[in-house]
Amino acid sequence: MKNEKLRQNIFSKRTFTKGCISPWAIFVACCILILPVLFTACEYNNKPEMIYDPTVANDTTGRPTITGILPATEAVAGVREITIVGSNLGIKNGTDTSWVFIGGVRPMIKDIQNSSITIYRPQLSNDKYDKSIYVSVTDTKMKVESSNKAYMVETPGVIVGDYTGVSTLLAVDFDKNNPGENLYTTAGKNLYKVDFAGVTQTIVLNPVNLLSSAYASITAMSFGPGAHGRNLFIAVGKNYIARLYVVDTLDKNNKPVTLTVPAVVSQLDFDENGNLYLGGVGNIYVADSSVGTSAAPVFTLMTGYTGGPNIKKIRVVKESGNQYLYVADSLGVWRSQIVGSSLVNCTQVVNLNGTALSACVITSFELDEHSSIFLCLKNNPNYSLFIKEIDGSITPFYSDPNILPKTVEKLTWGNSKYLYLISSSLQSSPGTYAPGRIYRLTLDRNGAPYQGRTFIK
């Protein structure tokens, strides 16, 4: 009875007229009725958005798909770029590149299109080279599964010829052993022969009969003509060169023959006829094939060279039936046709002056079978090996700076596809350096032949 009166008081107190309910009472009653609804609505709106609903199928309409990789199956050591081919690869119009993986690493990306992605050759861990790995492309938000394709990347090269403890590797050349090739190098005060097939190292000559004070600073050496067919010619940055008959065992009676040159020479090479070309301080000399047997061959000064005086290397190559001489100075490479004792149309084919590489110095160069120019540059903080591109620009051979050692000083092409990178301090493992190592890079092309090796029988 008491409660009934209370309810009546709430709904009937202060009426305008008898039988009418007060507006205030109506307002209070409505608030009491809607409060539970308001609390329920607020609780629902503050819940997190549903991320995954197992009852709803994923939309795979835009799924990236790999249909092929170029080059197919494998990227050999000379391959600089790899192209992934497929569909829906240009996610976010190429603004985000974090979804491409090869062998578990994110490569440097050159170009992204919807139908292709071009990546620069990646640096992989040693256990990922020469075996099946996966190339993967996936949506960055992982809303759809990735597209994977098996692939293989060949190791870029290996360290060969370990001369640890020797301060400087002075010069390198190869014989024409078939199959394989033997490397000859002067290191310290010894002439070594390295047999890669058997991984052996032989001291061919020692300081007593080779590297006296007259041969303390060898700058270049090359095999050439001679009665025995095993003559090795050595330049030492003096006004003479040495001719040495190379044997496979130590012979204390085998001493070099000194051949006097009219001026200081530091570089040498042979053409297919056994003619010897020598590079001096701004001068080029030539001697005919009698240099292999004569005690006093005639050296003739060649005309027509217009390059710089600080000659770093010379190379004789045959192009379209004619002989050409390439000469490198500190900042350029010059090409001339050989006509008798003249160099015709001497043209600068590499010029670092006025480029981003003008602070670098050319220490060596090489040519492949198509006369593409490989350059060894000093003073670059990230790279040692460069190549002249088709458009004339000079770029690092591998864009990833961690693939090749940075301390290379000389280049020598062996037989077939082996390019040797020579330095007194090649990196043997990340963070450590050891002197006296030679790195062999296996390329996808042959080198321009060293004509001097033609005479090795």
Image (cartoon, rainbow, N blue to C red):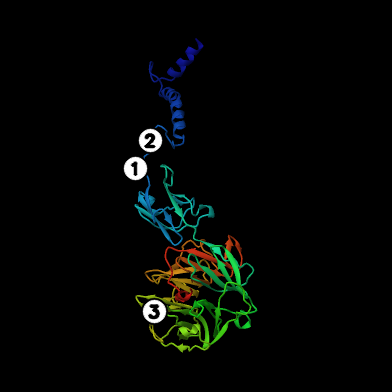
Q: Residue at x 49, y 54 (%)?
A: 130
Residue in front for this viewpoint, 398 or 190: 190
- Which residue bears the numbered disc 3? 323
Res. 208 image quadrant = bottom right
- Tell me, yes or no, whether the two marked residues, 1 and 2, touch with CB atoms within 8 Å: no
**Residue 386 appears at what percent x and percent y?**
46, 69
**Residue 247 appears at what percent x and percent y?**
57, 74
Q: Secondary structure at mark 1?
A: loop
- Which residue bears the numbered disc 2? 57
Q: Secondary structure at mark 3?
A: strand
- Between discs 2 and 3, the one toward the N terminus: 2
Q: Is residue 113 above or below residue 351?
A: above
From mark 2 to mark 3, how far is it between C-alphas? 69 Å
From mark 1 to mark 2, how far is it between C-alphas? 12 Å
Q: Amino acid at mark 2?
A: Ala
Q: Amino acid at mark 1?
A: Thr
**Residue 47 appears at what percent x and percent y?**
46, 34
- Which residue bears the numbered disc 1? 61
Q: Amino acid at mark 3?
A: Gln
Within 10 angstroms of label 1, few (less than 14), some, or many (20 or more) residues? few
Res. 335 image quadrant = bottom left
From mark 3 to mark 1, how far is it between C-alphas? 60 Å
Q: Residue at x 52, y 84 (%)?
A: 265
